[in-house]
Image (tube, coloured by chain):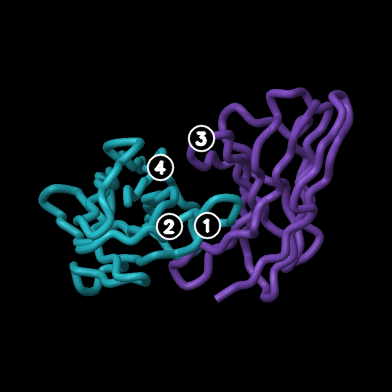
Chain colours: A cyan, B purple
């Protein structure tokens, strides 16, 4: 069985500060891992994905995430937050291509000017 | 990649009525997924729709309430039947191609 846990439903950071959104997963096989972003009143957009290649994955808008098998984690980071980063972020896991995705409960990011 | 067109984008419906949501994909896909996103919550999978067979429903969701059609490899519909205010939610369709999930823009449903 697969599951995703996102620690912290709400995260607030100051503009220019480090963004760290936490995600831990549970999977019986090597997983595919994803971060999606949802801006207000919009659909989900892929930020980045891990599919068993490099453990440090770079995505769009300056975000990156590191797959740590020993910690079963896939935390999302960005060195310097922008106001435009305010959104809902979802971590997701899939065990196979073409298979269903399992989503975490989401983390709402607020950026304070 | 895949581009998904979902409609309607939003609707306000009377309780007891039904709404059918359409999802059109620009490429052929084996499985299409229907999710519900209740206010302030994450995505919950309703069902998986395969072309040519009955949809597979997740625990807590039943075909009588959420009938799904999948007439071909690029199209699916989800009907929300006999609606109540508790059905107010965003409904999204999704496909997975080459390890990435793509989503429609969602249907924002309000039941009054």
Look at the numbered discs 2 and 4 and tell me whether their residues touch, using CB distance below 8 Å. no
Number of residues whose C-alpha sits closer than 10 Å to that of mark 4, classed few (under 14), some (14–19) or many (20 or more): many
Q: CA distance from mark 2 to mark 4?
A: 9 Å
- The N terminus of chain A, quarter of image: top left
Can you identify the residue that label 4 sits on?
Answer: A106
Q: Is residue B53 above or below residue B44?
A: below
Residue A57 is tagged as none
- Could you tell me which chain the residue with mark 2 belongs to? A
Q: CA distance from mark 4 to mark 3?
A: 9 Å
Quarter of the figure with residue B46:
top right
Q: Residue at x 73, y 52 (%)?
A: B53
- Could you tell me which chain the residue with mark 4 belongs to? A
Extreme residue in the front direction: A113
Instruction: State which tag comes first along the sequence, 2 or 1.
Output: 2
Can you identify the residue that label 3 sits on?
Answer: B40
Look at the numbered discs 2 and 1 and tell me whether their residues touch, using CB distance below 8 Å. yes
Quarter of the figure with residue A60:
bottom left
Between residues B20 and A112, which one lies in front from this camera angle? A112
Element assignment for label 2: strand
Q: Residue at x 36, y 46 (%)?
A: A110
Element assignment for label 1: strand
Element assignment for label 3: loop
Q: Across the whole image, how many numbered discs are drawn on residues?
A: 4
Quarter of the figure with residue A83:
bottom left
Q: Are marks 4 and 1 in one subunit?
A: yes
Can you identify the residue that label 2 sits on?
Answer: A36
Element assignment for label 4: loop
The mark closer to the camera, 3 or 2, is 3
Q: Is residue A13 above or below residue B40?
A: below
Q: Is residue B62 left or right of residue B97?
A: right
* Image x and y of residue A38, in percent: 49, 54
Number of residues whose C-alpha sits closer than 10 Å to that of mark 2, classed few (under 14), some (14–19) or many (20 or more): some
């Amino acid at each position: 069985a697969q599951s995703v846990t996102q620690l912290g439903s709400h995260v607030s950071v100051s503009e220019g500060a480090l963004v760290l959104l936490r995600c831990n997963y549970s999977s019986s096989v090597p997983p595919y891992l994803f971060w999606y972003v949802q801006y207000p009143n919009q659909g989900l957009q892929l930020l980045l994905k891990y599919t068993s290649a490099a453990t440090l994955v770079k995505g769009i808008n300056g975000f990156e995430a590191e797959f740590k098998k020993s910690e079963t984690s896939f935390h999302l980071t960005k060195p310097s937050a922008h106001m435009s980063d305010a959104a809902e972020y979802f971590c997701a896991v899939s065990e196979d291509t073409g298979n269903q995705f399992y989503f975490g409960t989401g983390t709402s990011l607020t950026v304070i000017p | 990649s895949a581009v998904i067109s979902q409609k309607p984008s939003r609707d306000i419906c009377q309780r007891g009525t039904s709404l059918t949501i359409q999802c059109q994909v620009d490429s052929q896909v084996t499985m299409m997924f229907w999710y519900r996103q209740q206010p302030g919550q994450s995505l919950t999978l309703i069902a998986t729709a395969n072309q040519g067979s009955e949809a597979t429903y997740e625990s807590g969701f039943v075909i009588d309430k959420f009938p799904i059609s999948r007439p071909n490899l690029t199209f699916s519909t989800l009907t929300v039947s006999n609606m109540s205010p508790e059905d107010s939610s965003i409904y999204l369709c999704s496909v997975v191609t080459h390890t990435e999930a793509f989503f429609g823009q969602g249907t924002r449903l309000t039941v009054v």
